[in-house]
Amino acid sequence: MKKLMKSTAAAVAISTALFAGAAQAQQKIGVVDMMNVFQQLPQREQISEKLQNEFQDRFEEMRQLEQKVQELRQKQERDASIMSEAEKTQLARELEQTISQAQLKSKALQEDTRARQNEERNKLLAKVQGVITDVAEEEGYDMVLESNAVAYMKADNDLSDEVVEKMSSGN
């Protein structure tokens, strides 16, 4: 019986030591909701305005081309009965050329704006990553994950608001 008690006591002591070691080895893990962070950042609005101003002339050119297409179509419908065949053909060619020009410029504008948006988003993402690193180091986190990669977390581990606060204050 004494041997059983000694064995049990030894087992309890060993398991307690193992659990204590496991508790010390436990990592502090933070989580950031990147979508939420990006939606709350004031820089997002600044970037949007910057890009709007950057492409303002090209947007205006597109509006003028669209207006010209609309005017040519109206003229084609309105004046078809009083136009000669040569005039109708000339108007149809001008309309087709204007439509083609508008489509090409629209496609180029979309590609350019998308590229610039990605460029600005990547710059902002790099800043956000830096702030996440700063917050994690300040608060002793061993690891920070994106919230969409986590099935469950305690609200205490969410660093999103702190990241937005630091980004908003200009740090």
Image (cartoon, rainbow, N blue to C red):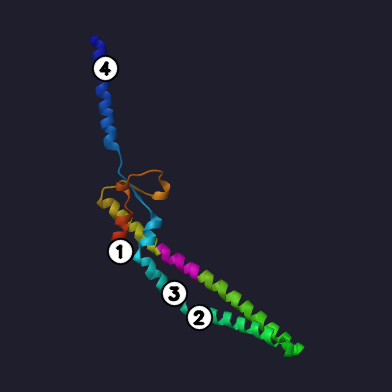
Query: Range of the magenta residues?
Result: 113-122
Neighbours of disc 4 within 10 Å: few (<14), some (14-19), many (20+):
few
Q: Nearer the viewer, mark 1 or mark 4?
A: 1
Which residue in the structure is indicated by mark 3?
52
Q: Earlier in the sequence, mark 4 or mark 3?
A: 4
Report the Cα–Cα distance between label 4 and label 3: 74 Å
Q: Earlier in the sequence, mark 2 or mark 1?
A: 2
Q: Earlier in the sequence, mark 3 or mark 2?
A: 3
- Image location of residue 162, percent across then percent down: 29, 56
SS under mark 2: helix
Q: Is the stretch drawn in magenta largely helix, strand or loop?
A: helix
Report the Cα–Cα distance between label 2 and label 1: 32 Å
Query: Do the CB atoms of the residues marked 2 and 1 lie less than 8 Å apart?
Result: no
The verdict on residue 33 being magenta is no
Q: Is residue 10 above or below residue 104?
A: above
Task: Decide which of 10, 66 is in the foreground and name it.
Answer: 66
Q: Is residue 111 above or below residue 80?
A: above
Q: Which residue corresponds to the image point at 53% horizontal and 70% vertical from the top-left? A: 110
Which residue in the structure is indicated by mark 4?
8
- Image location of residue 101, percent across then percent down: 61, 78
Amino acid type at image mark 2: Glu
Query: Do the CB atoms of the residues marked 3 and 2 lie less than 8 Å apart?
Result: no
Neighbours of disc 2 within 10 Å: few (<14), some (14-19), many (20+):
few
Q: Which mark is residue 168?
A: 1
Q: Nearer the viewer, mark 4 or mark 2?
A: 2
Figure quadrant of the N terminus:
top left
Report the Cα–Cα distance between label 1 and label 4: 58 Å
- Image location of residue 143, percent across then percent down: 33, 47
SS under mark 4: helix
Report the Cα–Cα distance between label 4 and label 2: 84 Å
